[in-house]
Image: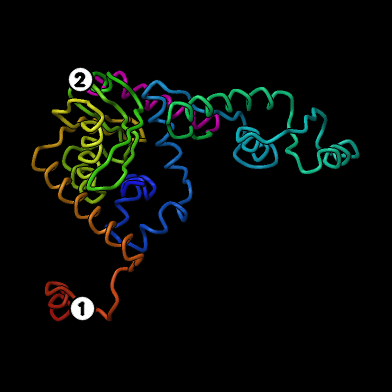
Amino acid sequence: MSEAAAWEPVHFSRLKLLAQSPAHYRVGHAARKETAAMRFGTAVHVLALRGEIVVFDGERAGNRWAAFKELVAGAEPYVYDGPHRGNAWKWAKEEAQGRPIVTSEDVAAAAAGRAIQGQRLAAGRYLSPIVTTAEYDVAARVAEKVRTHAVAGELLDGMHEQPLRWDRAGRACAGTLDVMGPRRIVDLKTTTKADPEWFPHHGRKLHYHAQLDWYAGGARENGHITDACFIVAVETTEPHAVTAFELSERALEAGARQTHLWLERLKGCEAADEWPEYVQSVVPFDLPDDDFFSTLTGL
């Protein structure tokens, strides 16, 4: 077995946790729970890139919602179209013997959802989020704003949601690239602000420049000529403003250095099977000079 094949492929979403500590990397996504913002962002991604998502026609609560999720995941249902009260409901629960109790209508809707998830898995893509009708309506409006934007719409032309596998620095790597266009790659981001002044500062803190270098390397290793890297940012609230950013050579160079350092640290941790936290000693708790002197002057 090669060195690269000895470990699970590295995904950027987990690699960047090394910016916190190796201990955070080791936990990875095990401690990460889906939030409404994450679900909405994924829904916008899939719809903007012409994919399908799973829609639940109801509220995100109660037995019907829980049963629908189980059905989409492949559970065997117990079909019951009667009222959820009285002896009939009591007998239905006994007959179900732990199986999710659903209506005939929900069985049909869940079957469509299972088909969508199956198609995405077969194509090597991440699973679709399960959204309510209300969530879908908003996500569809945001996705349409991106697709019809004069600049962003053209940038999104190309192959969508491309699963990539490659080796880097002796490690197996993986990722799903939003758009692989003519001599370019594009990543779509949902954000609270697509302001041209604010977003790059926000993106640096979230290591977007390193992420785009990561995807660019994967695209090139898979034979795609990549001369330019773009981020399309769209706001999640009205007016759903869209801004397209092209990463500079300097930003990508800094991103390449960052991902190289993370990978080298990861290999060292794997070799030693040691996963330290932030620090292993007592650290000082002090005030910056400006804060300290302001307390003296009262300003």
The three-letter code of the residue at mark 2 reads Pro
Crowd class of label 1 (few under 14; some 14 to 19; many from 20; radius 10 Å): few
Return the residue nearer the eye: 189 or 127.
Answer: 127
Question: Of the numbered discs in the image, which one, if any, rests on residue 286?
Answer: 1
Q: Secondary structure at mark 2?
A: loop
Question: Of the numbered discs in the image, which one, if any, rests on residue 71?
Answer: none
Residue holding disc 2: 182
Q: Secondary structure at mark 1?
A: loop
- Quarter of the image with the C terminus in it: bottom left
Provide the major secondary structure of the magenta segment.
helix
- Any magenta on residue 142? yes
| Residue 244 placement (x, y as % from top left) | 21, 30
Give the magenta part as a residue range: 131-152
Return the residue nearer the eye: 159 or 190.
Answer: 159
Q: Residue furthest left?
A: 250
194 vs 33: above or below: above
